[in-house]
Amino acid sequence: MNSVIEITRAKQSNLPQIDFGNLQFGSVFSDHMFAMEYVDGSWQNHRIEPFGAIEVHPVSASLHYGQTIFEGLKAYRGPDGQIRVFRPEMNHQRMNSSCERMCMPKIDEKTFIDAIQQLVHTDRDWVPPGEKQALYIRPVMFANEGQLDVRPANRYRFLIITSPVDSYFGMNTVAVALKAEEKFTRAIQGGTGFAKAGGNYAATFLATNEGRKEGFAQILWLDGVEHRYVEEVGQMNICFYLDGKLITPQLRGTILPGVTRDSVLRLVNDMGIECEERLIDIQEIIDGSMNGTLQEAFGCGTAAIITAVGSIGYRGRKYEINCGKTGPLSKKLFKQIIGIQRGEIEDPYGWTKVIPNH
Ligand code: COI
């Protein structure tokens, strides 16, 4: 591990006040956070400090123009007591690709991964032990320069905060209802849909609020040109098990290249099931639900893990999938991914990194 990270410990831990049996996604935070600043062309002052409020310049491009990006990954506590982080190098690659799109300074892989490892190590008692639980790790980078001109900033702050969580949709979620959205658009080619830019998420709130009033948990985004091809859910990528094949929207700049999506494709392929990454017409999914060839649908993401989709609302009608229940492939994938992440089953892919216990 890198020793140049200065550590200032919190005077008192908040852990005794936390009930791991009742965790709302992202509502409690561990005792420490990682921080560093980009000043004069380099990242400086790498440190772990007590979690708390920070100073942001009131005229920063992050507040005014949305120059902010983030990442999401998790640390898991296995039944063997070991803590493992899942594929952090993929989050690093994706963060740097978001940096490029948003004209922000990149971070080298060693700095990114050392910061995560040391922060998780410092707050290792905050990693909850439950099967669907984990310590969610949220790196975030934002402009922090006093400058109103509409241009990329010269100063940035990078933080990593962590939060003990259950699965995004809650411990007892069976299968979620999605609304295929035809009025609003999440992304178009040439835009920022593939980047984890803060504004991508704020732009989904209105559609999600409308969908919730109609009884849907989330939005199933369609392409921004014809509102015809399935894209993603916003909090997760989407996969369909259609006529014996796993199909998922191809990466063409409009959806997030998910780490769980990539892992699912590898696992399903290794199960001997044919996988296709391609354009998926929403009508093909509706037809599959009506004629019984659509066997299952599920979302996959760091926060959501594998979450079954029980129905899709489209043009005022609700189409059921697998009688609204989690299907066998979704269950098997959930068990395999969680099993690898928690060290319960062998990790033949070298996806997990163990955090030393001392
Ligand atoms: C993640 O799975 O890490 C995400 O980014 C979803 C999050 C916005 C809740």
Image (cartoon, grey):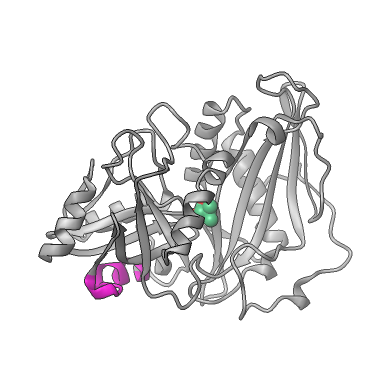
Q: Which quadrant: the C terminus? A: bottom right
In the rendered image of this protein, does residue 308 appear above or below residue 55?
Answer: below
Q: Specify the farthest residue to the right.
A: 11
Task: Give percent across and percent down for residue 133.
Answer: 54, 71
Chief secondary structure of the magenta span? Answer: helix
Q: Is residue 323 magenta?
A: yes
- Who is closer to the viewer here, 188 or 124? 188
Q: Image point 59% across, 60% down: which residue? A: 136
Q: Image point 42% across, 48% down: which residue? A: 258
Query: From which residue to which does the magenta span run?
Result: 322-335
Q: Specify whether 177 is left or right of 244.
A: right
- Who is closer to the viewer here, 22 or 47? 22
Give the quadrant of residue 74.
bottom right
Q: Image point 44% across, 58% down: which residue? A: 211
Q: Specify whether 232 is left or right of 155.
A: left
Give the quadrant of residue 102.
top right
Q: Is residue 87 visible?
A: no
In the rendered image of this protein, does residue 107 appear above or below residue 326?
Answer: above
Task: Give percent across and percent down for residue 97.
Answer: 50, 32
- Who is closer to the viewer here, 75 or 280? 280
Task: Give percent across and percent down for residue 214.
Answer: 42, 63
- Who is closer to the viewer here, 105 or 325? 325
Q: Specify whether 127 is left or right of 33.
A: left
Task: Give percent across and percent down for residue 203.
Answer: 53, 43
